[in-house]
Image (cartoon, helix red, strand yellow):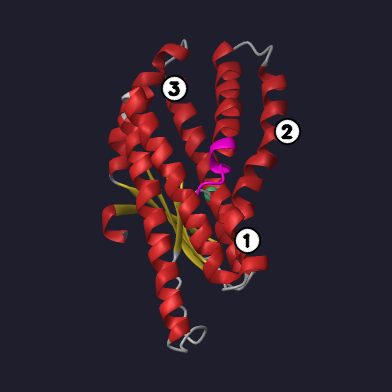
Amino acid sequence: MGGAGIRLFKFAGITVYLHFTWFLIAAYQVQARLYLYQSPIWALYEYLGLFAMVLMHEFGHALACRSTGGYANRIVLWPLGGVAFVQPPRRPGAMLWSLAAGPLVNVALIPVLELLCLLSANAANPDAAQLFRMLRLVNIVLLIFNMLPVYPLDGGQILRALLWFPFGEIRSLQIASVIGLIGGAGLAALALFWRSIWTGVMAFFLISRAVAGWQQAKLLVRLEREGRYGDTAPVAPSVEQR
Ligand SMILES: [Zn+2]
């Protein structure tokens, strides 16, 4: 992935890359937001603000994962959002904390953005007030979407970690993958209904990751049967995105 992206910076052992396609979609998205503002530069600020929020969310995952002794050294920003490549230790508690920390960043941003909205409400520049209102809305939408219990969205992976406690590593992944498949199929139906390409791309991503989760569970079952379960770490790096 490093070859397809620009290295932006490194913080706390985590390197942030920007995918090349980001610029194409950014140009399109900024164009589409121009009507919201009196001065066009604020449409660009809004898009950059959105990505600052995505970046903070991904750092939440990556830093939490490292705090559990897990492996996380790369974040890639691409047009549909961010991806933190995290591999927490194979314990449900470590996985739960690594996954919950991302949405918790959005929860922490709620009062911050509320305050910024209040402070800018009577500002001389109406574009500033509009910017913070939009970012406040986007933060809530991202939080709700991420918390849908559809694997591999954060909510689905949190559900999986919670199911791990009573059902174990394999069963919890099987249950979460099936819920993910159903959720992905539902989103695909919505994409057809709305005739939305973006929703279709998202549905395709969810379904393919849910299938990968199911196959990973199958691999674990085979390792267990061969008596090799636990002595290897066949868990693929958990990729999450928005
Ligand atoms: Zn996340």
Q: In terms of image quadrants, where is residue 130?
A: top right
- The span shown in magenta is 144-150
Q: What residue is at 54 percent from the left and 37 percent from the top?
A: 145
What residue would you read off at disc 1? 163
Q: Kindly indicate whether the residue at mark 1 contacts the one at mark 3 (C-beta within 8 angstroms).
A: no
N-term mark: 3 or 1: 3
Residue 191 at x, y percent in the picture: 35, 30
What residue would you read off at disc 3? 43
Sequence-first tag of 2 and 1? 2
67 up-or-down from 240: above or below = below
Q: Which residue does the numbered mark 2 point to in the structure image? A: 111
The residue under label 1 is which amino acid type?
A: Leu
Are discs 2 and 1 less than 8 Å apart at CB? no
On the picture, is 161 further left or further right than 217? right
240 vs 40, nearest the viewer: 240
Q: Gap between marks 3 and 1, in whole Å? A: 42 Å
Q: Is residue 16 magenta?
A: no
Q: Amino acid at mark 3?
A: Ala
